[in-house]
Image (cartoon, rainbow, N blue to C red):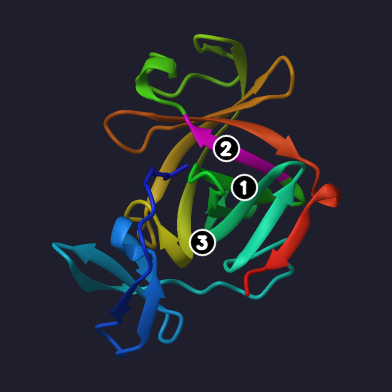
Amino acid sequence: MRRGVLKFQLMVNLNCPNCGYDLETRFAAAKMTTCTSCETTLFLESGHLRDAGSSGEMHDVPLLFQVGQTVKAGARTYEIIGHARFSYGAGWWDEFFAVTADDEEVWISVDEGDVVVQRHLPPGAAPNISKPPKLGAYVTTRSANYRVTEKETATCIALRGTFAEVLEIGTTYEYINCQGENYELLSGEFSTGVPDWYTGVWLDQYNLKIETIS
């Protein structure tokens, strides 16, 4: 959901316009970040930071990992740089924006212990669907068929870290989750004019190795 794609550049120093805190970040290639000092959401516009208000209340709960840590799953390592929390009908879940060692951008979703890593589908590989289908319907990509197992709306309630696109507290998104024949996951977000699609695979939380970046 609510995702974007970016390529990271060199570390840069920026200052929070609200409290003056020094933000050392890869923000030169991103569109938004949050200040760790005053918890303000900051947008990058024409090379300048703009105060966009509160980054929401991120209630303290046990987390598998967090911003500033790396997650190793098999041969893949993900550096966590952003954390977004969304509320929906059954509660809430966390999404972590991450980058791999070879600069691939992914989202890692964590909901009640279930962990999924997802990658953005380019337009040519995405389903040709403009509206969310009904539960139980089938969605076809160039390589597989998926059945719609979840259709929901979700609201962004908290943000921490750096992201590839602008996310705003209080924004509501409409999305679907679909299950493939080999347990692959296909997700579609219909909050904008053109749907965004992501393919995902499940990760075993008990086989993840978590390390804090020094």
- Looking at the picture, which amino acid does disc 1 mark? Ser
Residue ID at (44%, 24%): 132
Please state the extent of the stretch shown in magenta in the rendering: 115-120
Residue ID at (72%, 65%): 211
- Identify the disc placed on residue 81: 3
Can residue 104 be seen here? The reply is yes
Residue identified by numbered label 2:
118
> Residue 40, percent across and down?
36, 77
Q: Are marks 2 and 1 in contact (CB under 8 Å)?
A: yes
Determine whether 18 is above or below 157 in the image.
Answer: below
Label 2 and label 3: CA atoms lie apart by 15 Å
Label 1 CA crowd tier, 10 Å (few <14, some 14–19, many 20+): many
- Looking at the picture, which amino acid does disc 3 mark? Ile
- Looking at the picture, which amino acid does disc 2 mark? Gln
Label 1 and label 3: CA atoms lie apart by 14 Å
In this view of the protein, which residue sits in the foreground, 109 or 177? 109
Label 2 CA crowd tier, 10 Å (few <14, some 14–19, many 20+): many
Task: Give the label, 1 or 3, closer to the camera.
Answer: 3
| Residue 116 magenta | yes
Answer with mark 2 or mark 3, whichever residue precedes in sequence: 3
Residue ID at (50%, 9%): 142
